[in-house]
Amino acid sequence: MKKGYLLVLLLVLSLAACSPGHPEKAEYDGKPLKIAFAGEKPEYTNERVTFEEIPLDGIADKADDLSADYDALFVMPDVLEELSTDEYTSFFRSLSIPSAFVDADKGHLPFITEGVSYQTGFDLDNGSHSTVYLNTDGPENREDAWYFYLEDENGHDKSLEEVYTEILQRVEEL
């Protein structure tokens, strides 16, 4: 009888060990990326990702240079308000690389819409932490946005590092 209980206990424990819980932490392992950032440096370290700070002075006229030299632009929380003014609207719309607006509860709209700033824009209320925006010029002439969350589809918390990894994976795909 004790063997039966022991067998059931082992079976229950092995099933519990195999049940889906919080997935293992993902690490970016794609192609090497060179990321420009405005504001404070992202708190993310990976040998395949190089972050380079870009000065804000004159950035509005450097969309072509940034698009040629980098894989993406990360706009960090400390400069969201400053870069959401009308002065930069055409800059963001003319970049041919993705722009990631980090910790931006208002998404990408204040950056690409004239007359709307980060302060006056509305919250997305979709629970997203960061947004990646890409304007595809050319025959498609379309705009795309992807949202990234601090929770997975099962309601488990994700670390900021996991969110950065997801953003970088999206950048690589684009």
Image (cartoon, rainbow, N blue to C red):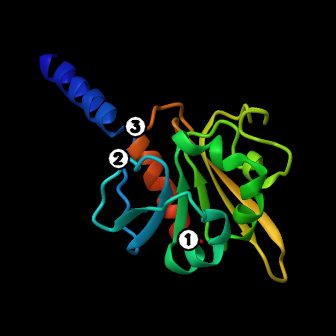
Q: Where's the C terminus, which quadrant? A: bottom right
Q: Which image quadrant is residue 140 in?
A: bottom right
Query: What number is the disc on residue 131?
Result: none
Q: Position of residue 86 (x, y in %)?
A: 78, 52
Q: In the structure shown, which secondary structural element does the residue marked by tag 2 occupy?
A: loop
Of label 1 and label 3, which has the lower sequence position?
3
Report the front residue among 3 and 45: 45
Q: Is residue 8 above or below residue 158?
A: above
**Decide: marks 2, 1 in contact (CB < 8 A)?**
no
**Decide: marks 3, 2 in contact (CB < 8 A)?**
no
Q: Position of residue 134 (x, y in %)?
A: 69, 64
Residue at numbered disc 2: 25
Please name the amino acid that badge 2 sits on: Lys
Please name the amino acid that badge 1 sits on: Glu
**Mark 2 surroundings within 10 Å by alpha-carbon count, few (fewer than 14), some (14 through 19), many (20 or more):** few
Query: What number is the disc on residue 22?
Result: 3
Q: Where's the N terminus, which quadrant? A: top left
Please name the amino acid that badge 3 sits on: His
Q: In the structure shown, which secondary structural element does the residue marked by tag 3 occupy?
A: loop
Marks 3 and 2 sit apart, C-alpha to C-alpha, by 9 Å
Q: Report how many numbered discs are placed on residues in the image.
A: 3
Residue at numbered disc 1: 173
**Mark 3 surroundings within 10 Å by alpha-carbon count, few (fewer than 14), some (14 through 19), many (20 or more):** few
Q: Nearer the viewer, mark 2 or mark 1?
A: 1
Marks 1 and 3 sit apart, C-alpha to C-alpha, by 25 Å
Query: Which residue is outermost to the top?
Result: 1
Left or right of 167, for residue 49: left
